[in-house]
Image (cartoon, rainbow, N blue to C red):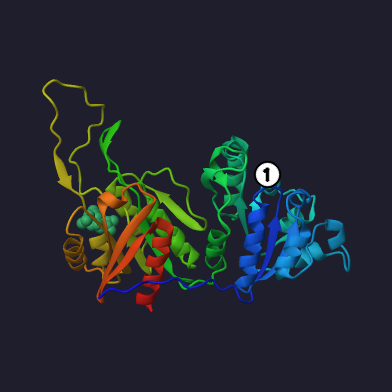
Amino acid sequence: MESAVGIETVSLEHKKIILGVTGGIAAYKAAELCRLLTKADADVQVVMTAAAQQFVTPLTFQALSGKPVLTSLWEAASGDGMKHIHLSRDADLLLVAPASADFLAKLAHGRADDLLSTLCLARTCKLAVAPAMNREMWATAPTQRNLEQLRADGVNVLEPTAGEQACGETGLGRMLEAADILASLPGLLGAGPLAGKRVLITAGPTFEPIDPVRGLTNLSSGKMGYAVAQAAAEAGAEVCLVSGPTCLATPAGVRRIDVQSVADMRRAVLAELPSDVFIAVAAVADYRVDAAATQKIKKSAAGLTLQLVANPDILAEVADLLDAPFCVGFAAETEELAEHAEAKRRRKKLPLLVGNLAQDTLGQDTAELVLFDDQGQHRLPRADKLTQARHLIKHLVNLLN
Ligand code: C5P
């Protein structure tokens, strides 16, 4: 039996959100975000910095949010003069989008010289920032230092994406699209269908040492596992991502543990149990070198034979525990997907297994997936990996319920 899997629309009913807009060309995307927030029934109060008003007028946001926009610390000081304090006390979330490099620097140093930065400093609610800037400004050491500080301070950084920039350059620093920012909010607000659930995920390749400078690995990019971690966090779960070596950014709100070998990954996974859900996306090496050399192996005309031994199957071990979490496996096959995937699901005792054709998926940004569960097969036609991950989490929520 095959069925389509849909995604619910985001509801932010009764959520009070302060949308902070700082100076950058991505301010035009904040107008779209404001519209989506109000459409999702959030109560939105827009606060703009002076620089933001050089890009978009307050009137635009007033029309979209249905409320006058706040722009000045001194204007906010009317009444009892404490609006800069009360505003964030009442809010569920302070969301700064776009957050310029300058604003991030200000936040990281606790400065408060305008209404928005004062609100951020005086807040008791959660703070999320969606950075937007030129790729060089993003990559530069001071910006990265500031971001590290902000993450350590508990600020949720909604990582920018790579692509064409308004300045004509191409690279990392584009603000997330408004719809993607919106999708991340229920999770940040603890309002998603996985709120209160612990989700443990493995992702990426593993690396088995041959000697101190060489090893056995595979072509997994980690993109699917990171997308699943993001989708689970969006759904409100407390997500721990045990990741093999990748160069991907950690999704907002996700706790990441870096590992290399299968033994490291297994140790990290077992230490993170108990968990409500375990999703094994990692491309785990089936074999490791029996005795990795402690010194670099010298070249020899006689060639080299490596003795490989089988690695433990982390997913099968976790699924076999008495108090096993709800376990989800991934199967990348090169042929006869349905037969191999279903056999694997039964062998590993999994309620849900995600199958894909390896040659169509590895390293790519899109994937075509088939979900196998007790009800049968559910096909997810080709789409970007984040969209697929959201479908998968939606399906998992239905099975959990
Ligand atoms: O048996 P196979 O490697 O094809 O199974 C794939 C699934 O099992 C994936 O979910 C993968 O993350 C997991 N796995 C594991 N430990 C292994 C091998 C695979 O957790 N040693």
Q: Which one is nearer the viewer's eye here, 102 or 201?
A: 102
Mark 1 residue's CB less than 8 Å from ligand 1: no
Q: Where is residue 372 in the image (x, y as percent from the top left)?
A: 26, 68
Q: Quadrant of residue 179?
A: bottom right
Quarter of the picture holding the N terminus: bottom left
Q: Position of residue 311 (x, y in %)?
A: 20, 50
Crowding at mark 1 (Cα within 10 Å: few <14, some 14-19, many 20+): many
The reply to whether residue 351 is visible in this rendering is no
Q: Which one is nearer the viewer's eye here, 84 or 291?
A: 84
**Is 194 displayed left or right of 132 in the figure?**
left
Three-letter amino acid code at the position of disc 1: Ala
Q: Which residue is outermost to the bottom?
A: 401
Q: SS of the residue at dot 1? A: helix
Seen in the picture, residue 294 relative to 390 is either above or below; the reply is above
The reply to whether residue 322 is visible in this rendering is yes
The residue carrying mark 1 is 105
Q: How many callouts does the rendering have?
A: 1
> What residue is shown at x 15% (from left), y 35% (from top)?
306
**Is 390 displayed left or right of 11 in the figure?**
left
Q: Which residue is outermost to the top?
A: 301
Seen in the picture, residue 134 relative to 193 is either above or below; the reply is above
Seen in the picture, residue 370 relative to 11 is either above or below; the reply is above
> What residue is shown at x 57% (from left), y 39% (from top)?
135
Q: Quadrant of residue 321?
A: bottom left
Q: Which residue is outermost to the right?
A: 79
> What residue is shown at x 46% (from left), y 59% (from top)?
230
